[in-house]
Image (cartoon, rainbow, N blue to C red):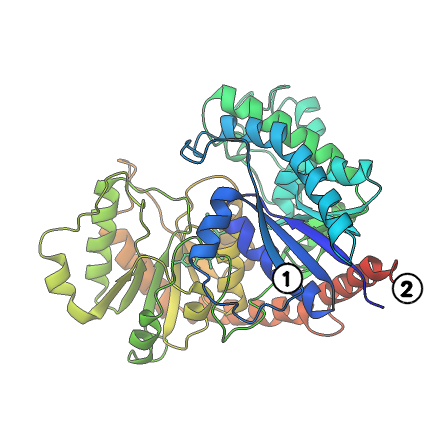
């Protein structure tokens, strides 16, 4: 009889919820029941953009827990949010597990926590429940978290996680270089914020290292050097939308499907797709320069202008921009990105290089123009430009701006030099092979599912 029941807990950010939900859906397909726990604020966002059941089976239930802050409080204050989560959520999780174990015919048999929600692992440990951690970004980023002690011992950061100097380092000569200021805890605010978040990450990392399974949404084909140095981390990706035709769950903003019809009307391999994920903020001057650059390319473009992409409450485009662009450009506030990237009209992806966007571009063989904003996005840019060679970096001028001229010139280069598309297609083949039957990620996933089901009788 199937009786596995798994709790899955993502970090409350868009780029963490989508991949863990994809992963959870794989488990549901194998008859495993999932209770997917978001914080209240995230749960509301996800629920408001996911009205139907969208093909979710009865084995998937979505619930919420308070994160310790009032609903109106600012979640951009990461120190405050981290402290609140670590103080409040462990007890709430324990209560929830006890309730489920009393009321549900399937008791909780495993907890899968995002590494950034590593506080959940000791709760499972204490209750005698199996535990696994899930990392939704590159293994090189996870490696820098798990190597926190080495970074302190090597004088790269101090005991509070604050970088000691700006020197770029490598965890090993075969791994991409990292700038200390781009470490995930060091790029999010002042040194007090860094300290609070770093100490929480250290606790989480210790719990992860005591864990029975550490899973990462990446593939041996993408990051072989790092996976060989950190064999305890198992690649299970790249996770793709499990049902590419259905509306995808987990989005914080409503996806605008009308852009797919617009894409249908564009010539094959002609459109520049521009999207910077859920966090990036551009200043007004840069935003306008980007608009002018897209105009100068003279090519069709689909541009995601997310609410909050600039600090201003309403975005303003260069004078006359909309009239001059007409139907050549399409602007949406949130796109069904995976569907856009798999559309035959899309020629290239101007991206902030968030890991999910990176994987989604790779999975579809689309070449990149890289515009990283913070954190691991710079390492992902290194992968794209220097290691996989499926894209080019957009360079800032001495005033710190990526000019319209630069945008036009790099777009032309990426689209005229077939090397980028050829490399992108070759990488896609490799990446996708790892999740096909017999591929290394697929084997890890199957083994993980067997491990979860071991206790079934
Ligand atoms: N995304 C989307 N529509 C958009 C922009 C982004 O669906 O218009 C999705 C994208 O497919 C990816 C996620 O949002 O799955 C963003 O994650 P990523 O790691 O790329 O960036 P982050 O938001 O964490 O910076």
Q: Residues within 10 Å of mark 1 (few under 14, many from 20)?
A: many
- Kindly identify which numbered label has been placed on residue 308: none
Which quadrant is the N terminus positioned in?
Answer: bottom right
Q: Position of residue 254 (x, y in %)?
A: 38, 59
Q: Residue at x 64, y 19 (%)?
A: 159
Q: Position of residue 208 (x, y in %)?
A: 74, 39
Confirm whether residue 455 shows in the render: yes
Q: Position of residue 411 (x, y in %)?
A: 32, 61
Confirm whether residue 163 shows in the render: no
Quadrant of the picture in which ligand 1 is shown: bottom left
Q: Earlier in the sequence, mark 2 or mark 1?
A: 1
Q: Residues within 10 Å of mark 2 (few under 14, many from 20)?
A: few
Q: Position of residue 457 (x, y in %)?
A: 90, 64
Which quarter of the figure has residue 97? top right
Instruction: Tell me if 5 is positioned left or right of 340 in this view.
Output: right
Task: Give the vertical position of 24 relative to 326 (above or below).
Answer: above
Badge 1 element: strand
Q: Residue at x 63, y 64 (%)?
A: 25
Q: Residue at x 43, y 52 (%)?
A: 252
Badge 2 element: loop
Residue marked by disc 1 = 60
Task: Give the vertical position of 64 relative to 25 (above or below).
Answer: above
- Kindly identify which numbered label has been placed on residue 457: 2
Query: As drawn, which residue projects farthest toward the front?
Result: 103
Instruction: Tell me if 58 is positioned left or right of 274 in this view.
Output: right
Instruction: Tell me if 72 is positioned left or right of 402 in this view.
Output: right
């Amino acid at each position: 009889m199937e009786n596995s029941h798994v709790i899955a807990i993502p970090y409350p950010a868009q780029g963490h919820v989508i991949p863990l939900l994809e992963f959870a859906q794989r488990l549901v397909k194998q008859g495993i029941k999932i209770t997917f726990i978001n914080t209240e604020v995230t749960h509301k966002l996800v629920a408001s953009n996911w009205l139907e059941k969208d093909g979710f089976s009865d084995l998937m239930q979505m619930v919420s827990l308070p994160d310790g802050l009032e609903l109106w409080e600012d979640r951009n204050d990461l120190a405050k949010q981290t402290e609140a989560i670590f103080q409040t959520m462990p007890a709430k999780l324990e209560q929830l597990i006890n309730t489920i174990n009393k009321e549900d015919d399937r008791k909780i048999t495993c907890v899968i926590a995002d590494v950034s929600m590593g506080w959940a692992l000791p709760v499972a440990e204490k209750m005698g429940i199996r535990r696994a951690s899930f990392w939704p970004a590159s293994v090189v980023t996870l490696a820098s978290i798990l190597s926190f002690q080495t970074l302190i011992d090597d004088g790269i950061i101090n005991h509070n996680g604050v970088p000691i100097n700006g020197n770029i380092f490598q965890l090993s000569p075969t791994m991409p270089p990292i700038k200390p200021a781009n470490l995930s805890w060091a790029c999010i605010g002042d040194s007090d914020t860094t300290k609070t978040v770093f100490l929480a990450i250290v606790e989480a990392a210790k719990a992860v290292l005591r864990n029975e399974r550490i899973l990462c949404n990446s593939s041996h084909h993408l990051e072989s050097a790092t996976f060989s140095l950190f064999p305890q981390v198992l690649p299970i990706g790249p996770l793709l939308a499990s049902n590419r035709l259905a509306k995808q769950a987990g989005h914080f903003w409503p996806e605008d499907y009308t852009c797919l019809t617009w894409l249908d009307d564009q010539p094959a391999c002609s459109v520049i797709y521009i999207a910077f994920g859920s966090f990036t903020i551009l200043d007004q001057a840069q935003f306008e320069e980007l608009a002018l650059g897209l105009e100068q390319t003279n090519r069709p473009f689909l541009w995601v202008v997310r609410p909050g992409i600039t600090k201003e409450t309403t975005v303003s485009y260069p004078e006359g921009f909309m009239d001059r662009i007409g139907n050549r450009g399409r602007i949406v506030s949130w796109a069904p990105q995976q569907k856009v990237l798999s559309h035959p009209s899309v020629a290239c992806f101007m991206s902030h290089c968030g890991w999910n966007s990176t994987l989604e571009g790779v999975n579809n063989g689309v070449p990149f123009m890289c515009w990283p904003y913070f954190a691991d996005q710079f390492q992902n840019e290194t992968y794209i430009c220097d290691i996989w060679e499926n894209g080019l970096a957009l360079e800032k001028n001495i005033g710190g701006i990526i000019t319209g001229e630069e945008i036009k010139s790099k777009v032309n280069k990426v689209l005229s030099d077939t090397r980028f598309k050829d490399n992108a297609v070759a990488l896609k083949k490799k990446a996708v092979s790892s999740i096909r039957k017999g591929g290394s990620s697929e084997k890890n996933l199957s083994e993980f599912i067997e491990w979860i089901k071991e206790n079934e009788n």
